Image (cartoon, rainbow, N blue to C red):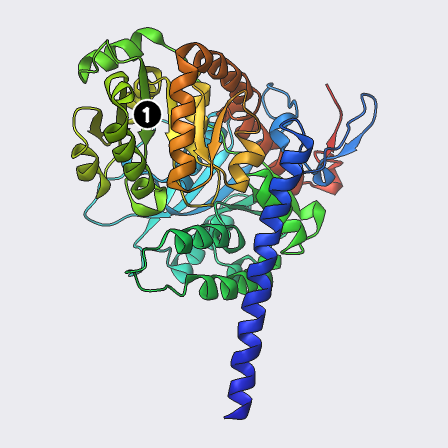
Amino acid sequence: MAKDSVTVLNFHRLCCIISVFCVWSFISFIYWRHYYGPGYSLYPKMELKQNQINDLLAFPSAWNQLAFSSKPPPKLLKIALFVKKWPHRSEAGGLERHALTLHLALAKKGHELHIFTTSSSNSSFPRYPISNLYFHLSKPTAAGYLDQALVWKLFQTQNSTGRPFDVIHTESVGLLHTRSRNQTNLAVTWHGIAYETIHSDIIQELLRSPKEPKGSALTERTMKVIEEVRFFPSYAHHVATSDHVGDVLKRIYMLPDDRVHIILNGVDEDIFKPDIAKGNDFKKKFGVPESRTLVLGMAGRLVKDKGHPLMFEALKQMLKENEAFRQSIVVLVAGNGPWGARYRDLGTNVLVLGPLEQAQLAEFYNAVDIFVNPTLRAQGLDHTLLEAMLSGKPVMATRLASITGSVVVGTEVGYTFSPTITSLKATLYRVWKDGRGDLKQKGQAARQRGLQLFTATKMAAAYERLFLCISNDENRGDNYCQYQIP
């Protein structure tokens, strides 16, 4: 009994230590951002010299910054992708959209893509007119994941057919670490890690109503961090989708620098781009009054962890307390979820549009003056922010490390707020007072940043070079891990 008490006490101490360290890390990040200003980056930059051969695997910043050749690839790869679910129409989440955008782009460049994913027998599966794109479908487990034994058998069959795979890629734990050991040509892209989510758990606890039961998420998350630190080394290479996560993987998860690579998410720049006419048509279609001088937009799943209770309450108070605000703004909400009905209760100032297809989303972004993402989930790099920026719109988002470290890096592209009603209201009022003139300038700056970092072309070029690098055949003299400024 005494031994059990000591074990429980030690466990609680460990939880407290990790939680305090998480808070300390976040406070340190905010301090440095404040002290050095918007132009300062917490993450190290490597200066690349014009005539020097540089080791790509040692590059500490986002590969999206680098200029890779747009010519046909020097060699075509046979690539295996493991992803839990392939996107279907407007139902896709961030991980699935990343898988779709990246791997279709690689297939169009000529690489042979084999997608190992799930498909239910009662659902249709999308078809693509690409001859070098192959799908290997299997029934999901009861929990909706890939059946590891079955999918590995499918992989081995394809690996022994023709030539073996040059590269294996898994979106998060599509392929479990138990199967990834000893695969030196494997890369995993993390769309959320447990350490990052602790910040979300802290926020949720602070926002918890006294009537709600106290959760155990923080304690459980701490154990999840420890579990991840133990099994992450089983993957040969790690791709972080934000600067912050790249730093955490190196410092907290203690992975070697040359096995962690930052490649920011990218979205299709041919779809998400400024188009005033389409934006005006969209507003007419959904009955947005021309008298409204500010159009706010939100898109995604309308659920609690995306910050909609917070946004709902802030809008409710502002519409009630400020007549001028109520007369001049309209909020467009794209997506579905339980908070859609509650937004409708706010009256004619809020138009709930339901889920939109990709082409409709492009029109939606062009119809708004600013895009707002009130998420409370500190995981991955949200695609909606990138889509809005490429559409030439400023963004307003929660002050989470991945967002402030990679996306809204300064006031020239948008606004950030703390996840409290007071901070959210103050920021919304600031946006309203700044007006369309200032927002248009911020939108132009946001698009420039988007074109520099967040296009599908930039993302695909970076992944292609990483895959070429980890597939290096030294017997052939391949040197794809070396980089020289063009």
Horizontal relation, residue 318 to residue 2: left or right: left
Residue type, label 1: Gly
Identify the image quadrant of residue 233. Answer: bottom right
Q: Residue at x 70, y 41 (%)?
A: 473
Horizontal relation, residue 145 to residue 446: left or right: left
Q: Is residue 301 visible?
A: no
Q: Residue at x 53, y 19 (%)?
A: 451
Identify the image quadrant of residue 425. Answer: top left
Q: Residue furthest bottom?
A: 1
Q: Residue at x 57, y 29 (%)?
A: 409
Query: Tag 1, which secondary structure?
Result: strand
Q: Residue at x 48, y 52 (%)?
A: 197
Q: Nearer the viewer, residue 81 or 427?
A: 427
| Placement of 207 over or under 470, stated as above or below | below
Identify the image quadrant of residue 143. Answer: bottom left
Task: List x then y, in percent, for residue 285.
Answer: 18, 14
Residue behind mark 1: 297
Q: Residue furthest top?
A: 277
Task: List x then y, in percent, for residue 203.
Answer: 44, 50
Horizontal relation, residue 318 to residue 113: left or right: left
Q: Is residue 156 visible?
A: yes
| Placement of 19 over or under 346, stated as above or below | below
Q: Nearer the viewer, residue 438 or 117?
A: 438
| Placement of 348 over or under 200, stated as above or below | above
Task: List x then y, in percent, for residue 368.
Answer: 33, 18
